[in-house]
């Protein structure tokens, strides 16, 4: 089951490996059902971290394509600038298959014999929020992939405060897209949605929204430049394991960066943390080069411990 | 009444000044009802030329805001990269009012004492398709505004073949967004929609779509540069007067350019053509500077003959 309006207020779905933990969200049911082998593939939308985060928490693959490629007809839109339809499944082959289905194009099989990628290790401006397990996993993975033949170099993102701009776009657009629900059924909305997102979004000046859009566009151009030197970026998929308790779906900051970026990204399962719950690593490719990202992900997947 | 799926196949609405002519489309009913004083304001969406063109044909004001600003919730989407909600009305004050209403911001009155604008006269790559009345109107208007104190210089757009890229984006996305209608109710669709738009869209390779998106983004960056030298661009609103006959809503090429550009634009009534039907001139501003466009439009409106 998804959360309230694909936002942050959870529903009944629990983590498939430990019922006391959240499966993440908003695509809670998709991730849990795929991880529990109830279904081979699920759909999710990502405005903040709603596809990658639950997939990482549940120990499966999550994939968010280049913004704009998958049709969004039928989706309850909360943020036209960010909402991206994604896929949760258990193999890269299924990602490639679903990509062909959703784009109505011929399937393009994953190339499992691609050359070692040039990897940018992007701890990101949110790095200090990653827990020790996640930081260790990422450092170990970067070193391991370098030892396996990949070129791995550290990269920094500019501008650094992009999460603030993601938040502004989210608030401003959601306040307008949920205006009917807010005005007519405000008492039925969760406090986190109503008071945490929509009310601040109504108070945000248009100029702040426009500045955020323009900053996001500059960020994307900077990423285009960065990808002239790298095939993929390596980054955390989440802060850590799925948090205990069902009151929150977890922290989306490691995902919101790449939602704003409009870049394709995916999370691969990469062992477990200290509570025995899954951890993931995230790979990000340049916009509209999703097939190359899948090929690089296959190279990485084959070399994860 | 709008056309079929806000596309090109007309319905019963006729031109308010001559029932043998199309009111334009797709926002046929909005434009005709506003021009006929049945309503003070109408809404329209523009994917090609569906707001500006019918407004120009009917002799009223049409306004398409910066792409992304007005919420699109409730709109049947045919092309997420292009569909823009716009306003059709009879005064710039109503444009400013509707802008405040639709953005849920405080009204920002039109400044009718702004300085003479720097105007780029943009005949555009479609110029040869404009009829003699329209070409003469635009040349006369450019000269008249210069005589009134505006700086007017000719500008060219790059790349020149942007209409081909607009078409590709339209076809590719519409084919996917109307997949249900095509698959399940294809026999109920008009031939112009089904065979003219959706079938070619299904055949278009993903690579051609991506190339079109990337070309559009380069076009927008070129426009950003251009607007460092100009406050507004002056361009035709349509090929000419509303065509006779109700089988077509007219040619959208002078509008599709600016839909692809994501820039705000508006059409002002500017006299009549040889059949006695309205003509319009189009003004285009830089993205997210819609208020400045309205101010410049007020300056121009006060100086039209």
Image (spheres, coloured by chain):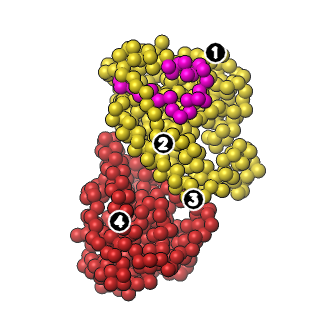
Chain colours: A red, B yellow
Whole-percent x, y for residue A152 in the image: 31, 75
Q: Is residue B285 shown above or below B176? A: above
Residue B147 versus residue B18: which sits nearer the camera?
A: B147
| Left/right of residue A132 with respect to residue A177 in the rendered view | left
Q: Residues within 10 Å of mark 3 (few under 14, many from 20)?
A: some
Q: Is residue B247 visible?
A: yes
**Tags 1 and 3 in contact by the CB under 8 Å rule?**
no
Disc 1 from disc 2: Cα separation:
33 Å
Q: Chain of mark 3?
A: B
Of labels 2 and 3, earlier in sequence is: 2
The picture places residue A124, in percent across and down from the top left corner, at 28, 66
User: Does the magenta-highlighted stretch encompass residue B128?
Assistant: yes
Residue under label 2: B159
State how far apart marks 1 and 3 are (Cα).
Answer: 45 Å
Under circle 3, the secondary element is helix
Q: Which mark is residue A192?
A: none
The reply to whether dot 2 and dot 3 touch (C-beta < 8 Å) is: no
Q: Which residue is mark 3?
A: B206
- Magenta range: B117-139
Q: Name the residue that disc number 4 marks.
A: A229
- On the same chain, marks 1 and 2? The answer is yes
Residue at position x 30%, y 56% from top? A162
Look at mark 1 in the image and give the residue it sits on.
Answer: B274
**Distance in Å between CA atoms under marks 4 and 3:** 25 Å
Residue B101's place in the image compared with A39, above or below, is above
């Amino acid at each position: 089951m998804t959360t309230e309006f694909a936002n942050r207020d959870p529903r009944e779905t629990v983590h498939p490996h430990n019922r006391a933990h959240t499966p993440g969200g908003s695509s809670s049911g998709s991730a849990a059902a795929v991880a529990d082998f109830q279904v081979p593939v699920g759909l999710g939308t990502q405005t903040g971290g709603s596809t990658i985060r639950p997939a990482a928490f549940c120990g499966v693959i999550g994939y968010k394509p280049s913004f704009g490629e998958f049709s969004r007809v039928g989706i309850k839109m909360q943020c036209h600038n960010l909402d991206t339809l994604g896929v949760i499944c258990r193999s890269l082959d299924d990602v490639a298959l679903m990509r062909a289905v959703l784009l109505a194009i011929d399937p393009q099989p994953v190339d499992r014999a691609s050359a070692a990628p040039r990897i940018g290790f992007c701890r990101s401006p949110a790095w200090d929020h990653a827990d020790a397990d996640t930081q260790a996993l990422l450092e170990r993975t970067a070193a391991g992939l370098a030892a396996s033949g990949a070129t791995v170099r550290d990269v920094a993102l500019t501008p650094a405060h992009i999460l603030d701009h993601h938040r502004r776009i989210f608030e401003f657009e959601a306040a307008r897209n949920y205006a009917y629900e807010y005005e007519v059924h405000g008492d039925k909305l969760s406090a986190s949605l109503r008071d945490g997102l929509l009310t601040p979004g109504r108070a945000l000046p248009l100029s702040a929204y426009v500045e955020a859009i323009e900053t996001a566009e500059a960020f994307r151009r900077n990423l285009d430049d960065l990808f002239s030197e790298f095939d993929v970026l390596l980054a955390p998929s989440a802060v850590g394991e799925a948090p205990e308790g069902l009151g929150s779906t977890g922290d989306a900051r490691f995902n919101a960066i790449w939602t704003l970026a409009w870049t394709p990204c995916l999370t691969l399962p990469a062992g477990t943390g200290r509570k025995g719950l899954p951890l993931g690593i995230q790979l990000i490719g340049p916009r509209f080069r999703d097939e190359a990202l899948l090929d690089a992900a296959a190279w990485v997947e084959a070399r994860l411990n």
